[in-house]
Image (spheres, rainbow, N blue to C red):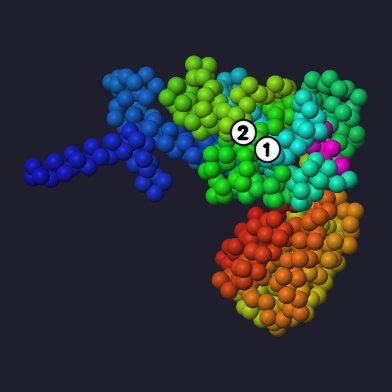
Amino acid sequence: MRRKSLLTLLVVSMLLAACDRGESIGGTPVVDRPSNAIEISILYAPEFAPFMPQVINDFNAAFAQGRNPVTGQSLAAGERPIYVTGADKSSGVVMQGIVNAIIAPGNATVDRPTLWSPSVSHWLALANYQAGRELFNLNDSPPTALAPVVIAIWESRLKAIQAKHPGQPVGWEELLEVLNSPDGWASYGISGRTAVYYGHTDPYISSTALSTLIAEFYASARYNSGNANLRRLTIDVVNNSRVQDGVRRIEQLIKHYSSRTTEFKEYIAQGPEYLDFVALEENDLIYINQGKTQYQPPEKLVALYPKEGTFWHEHPFAVPNADWVTAEQRAAAKTFTDYVRSRPVQEIILSNGFRPAVPDVPVGYPITTELGVDPNQPSTVLDVPDAAVIAAVQASWQFVKKQADVLLVIDVSGSMQGDKIDQARQAALAFLDKLPAQNRVGLMTFNHMINVSVPLDSFERNSSQVRSAVQNLFADGDTAIYDAVIQATQLLSQDQESDRIRAIVLLSDGQDTASLASLNSMVNEISSQRAGKNPILIVPVAYGEDADINALNAIARASSTRVQSGDPASIQRVLEIIIIYF
């Protein structure tokens, strides 16, 4: 009996020790919820994912041990512990979910957190605007971590631009000069590819994209509205056709889009052949230079703080004024907010590349020039416009973004018979459902023969024709993937003056068995298209376990993209991910 008691005591001691260290089992906190706890939930931006679970665990562990983690004091008699649950989720998605919970509670997508921490308070203002009332008190939503939005650019590229403008600050104006230079990067002494590759996320989902798009409007207004000293964006400025044209010129730098900064953080880390620059939070750039991505960067990325100005992301903690939050939960959320703003947690936040949100924690490592950032920047901070103006900037997105020509190239050889071709039909239709109407789309199918089922045209005009052709896909014959890719590339390259994203989405499940061309000749054809300012983007989808990964990887490398892997169960999700490129 004594031995059993000692064993029980040992297990409890180990669990409490684990709580102190913030450990978890399978991603689930080891701290059990006390039966009398006040439970609150938090949704936070993905940038907090590396450390917030530990912070939550430590907070919960302290209360489970009868101690207030903010004061360090034991809980008073009758004082209830607090228990926090949390998850990371993109800020734009959460904003819409919370607004839905207010104005359309029966919607399939709703969020009802006690606390919400978007990357930037733009989203709080937008939530108030969309809900038609003060859903969040911006004056009572304190910052928890600070990060300026920067342009992450390879050091060699930035030095080449600075050499052209010695002693002068660099911004969007100088980046556009590279784009407009007849020889692109070659005019700046950069050998190899001359085209400019810029990445951009979705401003309806990504905080960085929203801030960057607003900054692009500010930059364009400065040069195109006749007001070089513009201090604050207005609706009239956003709707000014010359300003919108200026934003379009910036967007012409785009290689492709993505939904979240997380994808671009991994993408650019592969090197200059994939992207020249991309907008990131400063902490993301530090993360890359610390070698924490799956790729080891070939050179250092550096932060360009645009001379036209940028925004601070402050990661506010905000409690919605909603009926799902009780007074008791509101007070508990305040306690958790105070904990996150306490010195020990702020030091954790600093170690993750953010600048502290409280003055008693000084800025230090890793905010250093060795990791590509400047602790004395940014020197110019833009004014946050009114919520209605932010909404107008978002609404302009489909009109100012770079449009795309998308050619779907689908393998219909005999190996696709049965469930595979059925799933491919469903996935392609789902892809088309999400394709913006301003894009152009076409359909090519191949087995041992190649058929342009639907020529490239405005999606508004040929939507029904493309859908009908997809629904009638039939699998039979051998596989001529090399010939199909060559013909698709030549088809898209006919429009040499295109200022649109030119993309091939290739879906294949098997080995090439029927091409006249070789793998090398296919790769050479793809590579030959990269010399221009608007190279063709090929996104290969390896469909099923028999897909020729070597050939698809060769296609991806030649196009500076990555193979997407799918199977009959996941192909629809894969194509839904790919749609965000456009």
Please state the horizontal and vertical placement of residue 307, each as a whole percent of the image. 76, 26
Callout 1: 10 Å neighbours few (<14), some, many (20+)? some
Percent x, y of residue 316 = 57, 27
Question: Quick one: label 2, few (<14), some, or many (20+) residues within 10 Å?
Answer: many
Q: Is residue 175 magenta?
A: yes
Q: Residue furthest bottom?
A: 477
* Label 1 residue SS: helix
Q: Place residue 452 in its image quadrant.
A: bottom right
Vertical arrangement, residue 450 with respect to residue 88, above or below? below
Secondary structure of residue under mark 2: loop
Q: Which residue is mark 2?
A: 372
Using the rendered view, name the quadrant where residue 504 is placed.
bottom right
The residue at the point 81 percent across, 70 percent down is 487
Q: Which residues are magenta?
A: 171-181
Q: Residue at x 51, y 33 (%)?
A: 352
Looking at the image, residue 1 sits to the left or right of residue 17; the answer is left
State the predominant SS element of the stretch in magenta: helix
Residue 3 is left or right of residue 97, and the answer is left
Q: Does residue 102 appear in this view?
A: no
Kind of residue at disc 2: Gly
Give, as a three-letter code, the residue at label 1.
Glu
Alpha carbon separation for disc pair 2 and 1: 8 Å
Pick the front one: 181 or 559: 181
Which residue is disc 1 drawn over? 155
Q: Quadrant of the N terminus?
A: top left
Mark positioned earlier in the residue sequence (2 or 1): 1
Q: Please report the residue visible at 61 percent of the width from the left and 46 percent of the height from the top.
A: 298
